[in-house]
Image (tube, rainbow, N blue to C red):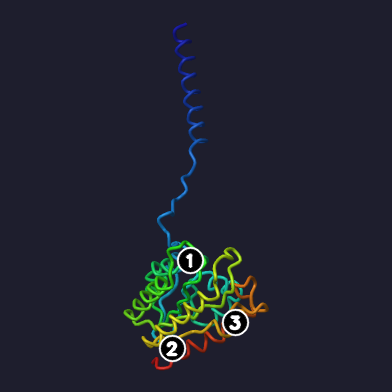
């Protein structure tokens, strides 16, 4: 009788242990990795950068650093980047300080001969109350100085025209973009950097983007990007004019 009771108790213990284990396995979920510290989204291109071979000695690699304008460009016309030595490192929505944080990983470490920097529109569109044109320029200047320090040719972009942001129509975008572009052009001339003018070939009478060249007044359509490709190639040639 004692043996039988001992066996029953032992069996009950095993069943309870198994049930507890099953309950624990159901309640235990794989923890999602927390990327809240990666404010600049360095993980976005980390793996691509790791497998990207270093350029050959005579290769004129050019990195495009910017936000959605550059990221969507490669999606709309990937062949443009594939047939050239162009590396797209655009991340939608990014502000100029985020581009600055990414500059070492997504530009310097890739050993390009030139970098094209398109920055400032998302800063203006955010309307946080803390962004000024001068602060945007500080970030652009820091990126340009880092590039020059590492013998990377600097190509600074006059931003595309924007009449208003569909998601934030309170912003007087057109005049702010003009102000930013004037400062970028003046700084570029002072430091002998190449200016890439995306504003002039896309602008309409309201200082916005021509309707036939844009999807939303901010981002170009394929026709708009084709025009940008022409002026980009011309600017890259100017930047490399004295390159050997």
Kind of element beneath mark 2: helix
**Labelled disc at residue 203:** 3
Q: Which is more N-terminal, label 1 or label 3?
A: 1
SS at mark 1 in the image: loop
The answer for how far apart the CA atoms under marks 2 and 3 are is 24 Å
Instruction: Give the answer, above or below, for where 1 lies relative to 51.
Output: above
N-terminal of the two: label 2 or label 3?
Answer: 3
Image coords of residue 53 (percent x, y) = 43, 74
Count of residue discs: 3
Q: Marks 2 and 3: CB-CB under 8 Å? A: no
Disc 3 element: loop
Please tell me whether mark 2 or mark 3 is closer to you in this view.
3
Label 3 to label 1, Cα distance in Å?
Answer: 23 Å
Whole-percent x, y for residue 70 in the image: 53, 73
Judging by the rendered image, the residue that carries numbered circle 2 is 239
How far is mark 2 from mark 1, CA to CA?
26 Å
Q: Which residue lies furthest to the right in this view?
A: 212
Residue annotated with mark 1: 94
The residue at the point 49 percent across, 23 percent down is 16
Q: In which quarter of the image is residue 43?
A: bottom left
Report the residue at 52% width, 35% height from top. 26
Position of residue 183 measured from the top left corner of the image (x, y, whole percent): 43, 80
Say which mark, if any, is on residue 129: none
Rendered-image quadrant of the C terminus: bottom left
- Image location of residue 222, percent across then percent down: 64, 77
CB of mark 3 within 8 Å of CB of mark 1?
Answer: no
The mark closer to the camera, 3 or 1, is: 3
| Outermost residue to the top | 1
């Amino acid at each position: 009788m004692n043996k039988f009771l001992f066996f029953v108790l032992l069996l009950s213990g095993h069943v309870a242990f198994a049930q507890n284990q099953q309950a624990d396995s159901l309640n235990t979920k794989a923890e999602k990795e927390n990327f809240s510290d990666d404010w600049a989204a360095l993980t976005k291109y980390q793996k691509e950068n790791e497998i990207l071979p270093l350029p050959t000695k005579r290769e004129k690699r050019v990195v495009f650093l910017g936000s959605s304008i550059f990221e969507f460009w490669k999606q709309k016309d990937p062949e443009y980047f594939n047939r050239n030595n162009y590396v797209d490192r655009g991340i939608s929505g990014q502000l100029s300080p985020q581009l600055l944080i990414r500059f070492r990983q997504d530009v310097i470490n890739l050993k390009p001969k030139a970098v094209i920097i398109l920055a400032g529109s998302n800063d203006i569109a955010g309307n946080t109350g803390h962004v000024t044109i001068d602060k945007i320029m500080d970030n652009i200047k820091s990126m340009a100085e880092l590039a020059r320090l590492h013998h990377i040719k600097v190509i600074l972009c006059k931003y595309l025209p924007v009449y208003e942001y569909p998601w934030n129509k309170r912003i007087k975008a057109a005049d702010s973009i003009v102000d930013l572009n004037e400062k970028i052009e003046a700084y570029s001339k002072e430091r002998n950097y190449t200016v890439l003018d995306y504003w002039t070939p896309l602008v309409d009478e309201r200082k916005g983007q021509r309707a036939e060249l844009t999807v939303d007044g901010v981002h170009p359509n394929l026709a708009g990007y084709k025009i940008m490709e022409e002026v980009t190639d011309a600017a890259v040639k100017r930047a490399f004019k004295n390159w050997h």
